[in-house]
Image (cartoon, helix red, strand yellow):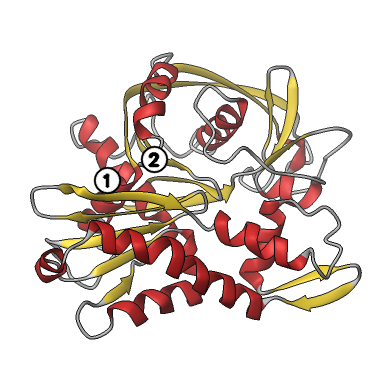
Amino acid sequence: MSTVSVSFPSVFEAAYGNSENTAASLLTGLKIKVDNQWYLVGDLARKNGVNAQRVVNASPDQIDFEILFKSALLNCVDTVDKPFNITLGLPYSTYNAYRQPLLRMLEQRYFTVEYNSETYKSDGGVRSVNLELNNFDVIPEIVGAVIGIKRGNLVTDSNPRNFIVISLGYGTCEGGMATEEGLVQRSCFSVHGIRYVVNNVQRELNKLHYLDMKNEFQLNDSLTKGVMIANRKRIDIRDIRREVISQYYRQVISPSLRAHFSDQDFERCSAIYLVGGGVLYSELKEQFEEEFTGFLPVEVVENPQTVASVGYYHHAMSLGGGTKANSIGLDIGNSSTIVTYRKNA
């Protein structure tokens, strides 16, 4: 037995008209009903929608959170035993404000998800499933990353003790120092994430190009590729991406590292581990290596986007006394929603 992590883009759009036979699976054909409105979610929204997006760092009582939460659980119906033991995470910056509202939502324990399988089944139709939670908890995202690194066998050191972890997310960049005893709270910080880069690139491109009302999530997809199509022209945006990422690191990330970590902290640590979707930008990893070369190794964790979800999964197992078959780690990120569970060999 091993764990598997599945993901879909954290975007959605209200659905109108037909959407039959537009996807190959439930994961890529998510269409669910919330508050009497049908929504295309994830890949289906990105490919078939016009303006698929969401509120960044949405609170648990916003419909954005509910849509992504139910869509994630729907993907666990046929693969995870019920009732679920589940752990979710929140960014360090919103943890204190959103933890109690999220726990109150989870305390409902019973959730009904109405979905339409016609998107990926020729004989599909409207279906409804009932889901039950057993044990649940909410922890900081940075704690999930630390657990994932320590228990997920994702780094070169098989038994990492003291290290710094930097989570490069879309909405926030977060970091902290982990020791054998736990997180060092004074070292924890949260600053602007990759959204900072996307918005600044958009401002620069708007000077010269008509972007056809692309929203930030659509622009982020183009930024990852390094090219975009605007007004029927292919535009190479790798140079501006490198320039803005370099400025982002110098003005946002590096000052936070200097403010929260001392020379003594660096001396105690064996490595800096980078996690999160921002690691997909090689220019950002290069900035870390340039600053710390010669005195502290910088390592990108294996499958960096799923590290927090893996950590949540291990925490969910502990809630259920170590049971694996009904444990779920759910990371509702601003860029991707990722769910980790046990996979039968």
Image quadrant assignment for residue 103: top left
Q: Residue at x 35, y 41 (%)?
A: 92
Lower position in the chain sequence, tag 2 or tag 1: 2
Q: Tag 1: residue type?
A: Val
In the image, is residue 259 above or below residue 342? below
- Residue, disc 2: 93
Image quadrant assignment for residue 70: top right
- 96 with respect to 52 (left or right): left
- Select label 2 or label 1 by which is in front: 2
Residue 42: image location, x then y, percent: 65, 45
In the image, is residue 163 above or below residue 5? below
Which of the numbered marks, if any, corresponds to residue 212? Answer: none
Residue 267: image location, x then y, percent: 11, 71
Residue 115 appears in view: yes
Distance from the alpha carbon under mark 2 to that under mark 1: 13 Å
Residue 345 appears in view: no
Q: Quadrant of the C terminus?
A: bottom left
- Residue, disc 1: 143
Classify mark 1: residues with Cα within 10 Å, few (<14), some (14-19) or many (20+).
many
Residue 319: image location, x then y, percent: 23, 30
Q: How many marks?
A: 2
In the image, is residue 223 above or below residue 175? below
Q: Secondary structure at mark 2?
A: loop
Q: Tag 2: residue type?
A: Ser
Which is more toward the observer, 186 or 112? 186
Q: Secondary structure at mark 1?
A: helix
Q: Residue at x 58, y 25 (%)?
A: 62
Q: Residue at x 24, y 36 (%)?
A: 323
Which is more toward the observer, 259 or 21? 259
